[in-house]
């Protein structure tokens, strides 16, 4: 009977383990898509894509259910055999009692023990299979842990530095000077997100000197955000180089590179906690400095109107700023960037949810707010970049125009001029 049990278990265990693992893998797409549909229902309806998503989710459910049915069948198969073994065990014990020479009391003890034993045996098997299933989750965690960290993956990039002497120079300079530099040069940069995709940055060549404020304009999808992705080494550079100070960014440890810049994105993420923790997570600044910065970003009055806290720094922010508007979230992130005084500040349409008058006021002040920093500002609104030192216009992943915005605006053949006319519908001369 023991041999029969071992053989049954050896057949059951590997099959059950594999199916459990596949079930876990197929559970994620089903749950993810459900959440996406749940959160984006209004967008799906607006584009009339209900059938597409229903079909997609039905496919996910089918894949999951096929495996679920398989799992139930495997468990059923095993359960039938195990119960068969225990029935045989009871029959054997009953025959033993009937044909053996036992007193009634002894026969009772044996029968009770056998039933107890059978129950424990089934419990043991159940716990064993549960344990094996739980171990599958642990194995999934282990698989995630064994992914190579980003730094190791991104190290072997073979970016080619055009001026060969620059490479020799690099080796002489230590890391400290690299990260403190704030001039940036894009030297014939070609980049794509993945090998099998097209180039998203093509022939990008321009330089930004220390402390310059640059506006980046272009249609949606023209590659503006991808410039930042390349600068932060999120997108690998295929050809050319981005040089920070006089060091290729590929030579700078990823952590140092990214911590040398403040990045404000279109959809900033805020951790839950008090407002003071959001803008100063390491408690490095005084209360006065924090309040001053909030005042400079024009956020103080808005917060005072909306919240009853006597000190606005004590306002409680929910998970990912769930209890505050997108515009305020962007201003809070901007305050953090101003406070940290990083040498390079990247702003990606960070004021898209702020009313136009506050935005204009902010950009007018950005020169003084981020005085010594090199600032790159991606914006959809031409007006917001007019006070900056230079603008770079991207189209179809290439630079099509570059120069001082005021100068460019004087030339009616320039791209900026036509963008200005398009956006404001007023002649620049009237301004
Ligand atoms: N993570 C990504 N993986 C693959 N392609 C991407 C990724 N992010 C953006 N893209 C593609 O890169 C192109 C430029 O996008 P992006 O730089 O975000 O444009 P912009 O900021 O000018 O609107 C788009 O065609 C977009 O589909
Ligand atoms: Mg973008």
Image (cartoon, rainbow, N blue to C red):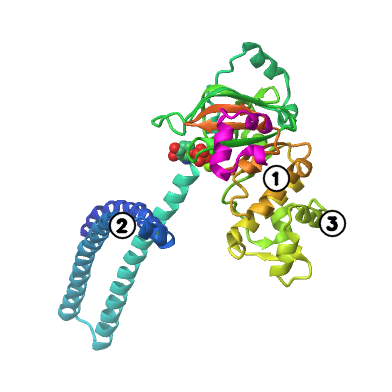
Q: State the separation of the CA atoms marked 3 and 2.
A: 53 Å
Q: Which residue is mark 3?
A: 288
**Residue at (22, 82) in percent of width and height:** 102
Where is the C terminus found, in terms of image quarters? top right
Q: Main secondary structure of the magenta part?
A: helix
Of the two numbered discs 3 and 2 in the rendering, the one whose residue sits closer to the viewer? 3
Q: Secondary structure at mark 1?
A: helix
Q: Which residue is mark 2?
A: 57
Of the two numbered discs 3 and 1 in the rendering, the one whose residue sits closer to the viewer? 1
Res 377 → quadrant: top right
In the image shown, does 21 or 41 lie closer to the viewer?
41
**Residue at (46, 50) in percent of width and height:** 141
Q: State the separation of the CA atoms marked 3 and 1.
A: 23 Å
Where residue 363 is drawn, which disc sits there?
1
In the image shown, does 105 or 326 lie closer to the viewer?
326
In the image shown, does 108 or 364 lie closer to the viewer?
364
Q: Secondary structure at mark 2?
A: helix
Residue 120 visible somewhere in the drawing = yes
Which region of the structure is painted magenta? 406-431
Q: Where residue 227 sits in the image (x, y, percent)?
A: 56, 34
């Amino acid at each position: 009977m023991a041999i029969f049990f071992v053989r049954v278990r050896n057949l059951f265990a590997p099959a059950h383990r594999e199916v459990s693992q596949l079930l876990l893998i197929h559970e994620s797409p089903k749950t993810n898509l459900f959440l996406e549909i749940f959160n984006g229902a209004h967008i799906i309806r607006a584009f009339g894509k209900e059938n597409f998503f229903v079909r997609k989710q039905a496919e996910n459910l089918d894949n999951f259910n096929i495996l679920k049915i398989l799992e139930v069948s495997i468990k059923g198969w095993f359960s039938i055999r195990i119960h068969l073994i225990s029935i045989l065990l009871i029959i054997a014990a009953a025959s033993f009692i009937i044909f053996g020479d036992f007193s009634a009391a002894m026969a009772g003890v044996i029968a009770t023990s056998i039933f107890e034993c059978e129950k424990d045996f089934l419990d043991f098997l159940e716990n064993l299979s549960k344990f094996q299933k739980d171990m599958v989750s642990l194995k999934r965690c282990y698989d995630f842990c064994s992914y190579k960290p980003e730094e190791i993956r991104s190290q072997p990039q073979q970016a080619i530095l055009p001026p060969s002497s620059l490479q020799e120079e690099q080796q002489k300079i230590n890391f400290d000077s690299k990260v403190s530099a704030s001039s940036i040069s894009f030297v014939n940069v070609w980049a794509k997100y993945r090998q099998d995709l097209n180039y998203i940055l093509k022939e990008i060549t321009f330089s930004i000197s220390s402390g310059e404020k640059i506006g980046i304009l272009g249609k949606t999808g023209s590659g503006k955000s991808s410039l930042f992705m390349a600068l932060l080494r999120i997108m690998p550079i295929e050809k050319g180089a981005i040089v920070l100070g006089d060091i290729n960014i590929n030579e700078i440890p990823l952590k140092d590179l990214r911590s040398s810049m403040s990045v404000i994105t279109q959809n900033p993420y805020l951790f839950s906690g008090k407002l003071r923790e959001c803008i100063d997570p390491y408690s490095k600044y005084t209360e006065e400095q924090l309040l001053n910065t909030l005042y400079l970003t024009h956020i103080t009055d808005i917060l005072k109107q909306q919240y009853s806290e006597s000190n606005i720094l004590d306002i409680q922010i929910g998970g990912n700023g769930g209890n505050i508007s997108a515009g305020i979230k962007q201003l809070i992130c901007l305050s953090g960037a101003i406070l940290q005084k990083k040498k390079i500040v990247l702003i990606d349409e960070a004021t898209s949810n702020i009313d136009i008058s506050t935005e204009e006021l902010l950009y007018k002040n950005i020169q003084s707010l981020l005085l010594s920093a090199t600032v790159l500002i991606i914006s959809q609104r031409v007006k917001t970049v007019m006070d900056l030192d230079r603008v770079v216009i991207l189209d179809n992943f290439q630079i099509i125009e570059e120069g001082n915005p005021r100068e460019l605006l004087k030339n009616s053949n320039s791209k900026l001029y036509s963008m200005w006319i398009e956006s404001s519908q007023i002649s620049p001369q009237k301004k």
